[in-house]
């Protein structure tokens, strides 16, 4: 392998060797920051709540291009199911193994090397910034969300952002993410009146009250989706009632449900529609809602064009534009006003035991990032 082609691999292995289980950063940001500082980036630590957040910027002119990612990883799970130590990077049969290999230390390493290469060739036509956090896999409260709030308050607005999450389906470049569904959850408690099953007239069975309303919620068509999103889905993940005795009508029933929703709906509209159903059925209830993120969709403009061209140049593939999968920190960056895409390695081993990335994809990924930046700043 040529000397240059191992640069991403070397940095990625250095990152994997740091045991940065969420929300630990374990020195990853300092390592990345030291490389960026040598290129002239000004580093700023926007830490909060035990979370390490690095904001590093080069240049003051527009447009502002952000490279974003996270250093934290999910727990490795049972050590005996791993063929090698998850925090000791190891190459076997052309694959680099270790926790974070795909999600997303390879992305971070590829971004830094891409930046080094671009700046060795020419100065920027704009500004470049890194937004790196150690709180993406956990609560994600003190990470990117917090940094975005701080930067917003200073009037900083980005134009473009790449999040280096693993997005490939079968091979590098076959798919990029341009939007995400929203996620809205609810803990619902329906209240009744406890009593003996033999005397139902003296009780009020909340399960019986909930059942027809729940049937209606399950049958509701929330929207039809659109060209980029499937229809909004409503799923119940838990239902629980009962006192433990088989002759007692319980006083309450608890339901947990979640919406994954398209840009055709909003959190507020879904909440209102649920409450309309509950009220029509006369349910006494308490609802505790939590919004993980509104949906977003990056319009097909400069960034997606640049990403398509860069991917095609490096891989020969025309990537599909994806909006599925779980949430990512792009949900905090998109509402800030930036065009956002997620581009990264193949994602089929993320969060699993024996997480890995194809060694030969590492340098190619950095060439893709370099190609996108080259076209826009
Ligand atoms: Zn990730």
Image (cartoon, rainbow, N blue to C red):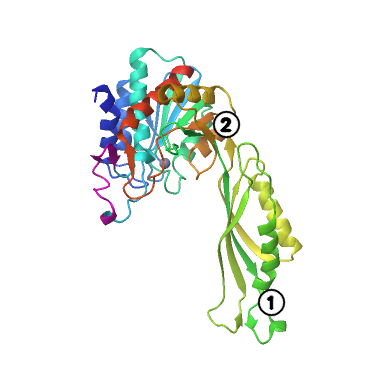
How far across and down, in percent of the image, does residue 209 sit?
A: 69, 70
Picture layout, residue 213 above or below residue 290: below
250 or 91, nearer to the observer: 91
On residue 298, which mark appears? 2
- Asked if disc 2 and disc 1 are in contact, CB closer than 8 Å, the reply is no
The number of discs equals 2
Residue picked out by circle 1: 204
Cα–Cα gap, marks 2 and 1: 49 Å
Of 130 and 172, which appears nearest the observer? 172
**Quadrant position of ligand 1:** top left
Q: State the residue at coordinates (68%, 86%).
A: 199
State the residue at coordinates (44%, 43%). Answer: 142
Magenta region: 80-97
Secondary structure under the numbered disc 1 in the rendered image = loop
Relative to 80, does residue 93 appear above or below in the rendering?
above
* Residue that extends furthest to the bottom in the rendered view of this protein: 198
Tell whether 133 sits left or right of 266: left
Rendered image quadrant of residue 235: bottom right
Mark 1 crowdedness (10 Å alpha carbons): few <14, some 14-19, many ≥20: some
Q: Residue at x 43, y 32 (%)?
A: 68
Between label 2 and label 1, give the one nearer the viewer: 2
Where disc 2 sits, the SS reads: loop
Camera-side residue: 258 or 31? 258
**What x and y, as percent, mark residue 103?**
38, 41
In the displayed structure, 293 sits above or below 67; it is: below
Q: Between residues 66 and 97, which one lies in front from this camera angle?
A: 97
């Amino acid at each position: 392998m040529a000397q240059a082609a191992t640069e991403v691999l070397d940095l990625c292995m250095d990152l994997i060797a740091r045991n940065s289980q969420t929300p630990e950063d374990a020195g990853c940001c300092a390592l990345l920051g030291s490389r960026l500082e040598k290129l002239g980036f000004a580093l700023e630590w926007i830490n909060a709540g035990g979370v390490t957040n690095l904001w590093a910027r080069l240049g003051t002119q527009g447009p502002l291009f952000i490279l974003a990612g996270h250093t934290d990883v999910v727990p490795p799970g049972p050590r005996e199911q791993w063929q090698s130590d998850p925090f000791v990077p190891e190459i076997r049969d052309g694959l680099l193994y270790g926790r974070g290999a795909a999600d997303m230390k390879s992305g971070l390493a590829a971004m830094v090397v891409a930046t080094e290469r671009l700046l060795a060739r020419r100065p920027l036509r704009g500004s470049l910034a890194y937004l790196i956090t150690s709180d993406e896999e956990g609560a994600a409260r003190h990470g990117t969300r917090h940094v975005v709030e701080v930067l917003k308050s200073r009037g900083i607005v980005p134009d473009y952002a790449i999040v280096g999450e693993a997005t490939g389906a079968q091979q590098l470049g076959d798919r990029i993410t341009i939007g995400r569904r929203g996620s809205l959850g609810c803990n619902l408690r329906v209240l009744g009146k406890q009593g003996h099953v033999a005397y139902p007239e003296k009780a009020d069975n909340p399960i019986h009250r909930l059942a027809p309303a729940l049937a209606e919620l399950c049958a509701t068509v929330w929207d039809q989706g659109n060209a980029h999103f499937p229809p909004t889905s409503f799923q119940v993940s838990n239902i629980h009632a009962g006192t433990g005795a088989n002759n007692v009508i319980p006083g309450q029933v608890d339901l947990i449900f979640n919406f994954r929703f398209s840009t055709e709906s909003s959190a507020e509209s879904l909440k209102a529609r649920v409450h309309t159903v509950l009220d029509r059925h006369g349910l006494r209830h308490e609802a505790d809602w939590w919004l993980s993120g509104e949906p977003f969709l990056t319009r097909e403009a400069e960034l997606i064009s640049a990403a398509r061209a860069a991917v095609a140049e490096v891989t020969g593939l025309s990537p599909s534009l994806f909006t599925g999968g779980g949430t990512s920190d792009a949900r905090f960056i998109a509402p800030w006003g930036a065009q956002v895409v997620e581009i990264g390695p193949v994602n089929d081993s993320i969060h699993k035991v024996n997480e890995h990335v194809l060694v030969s994809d590492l340098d190619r990924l950095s060439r893709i990032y370099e190609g996108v930046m080259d076209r826009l700043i």
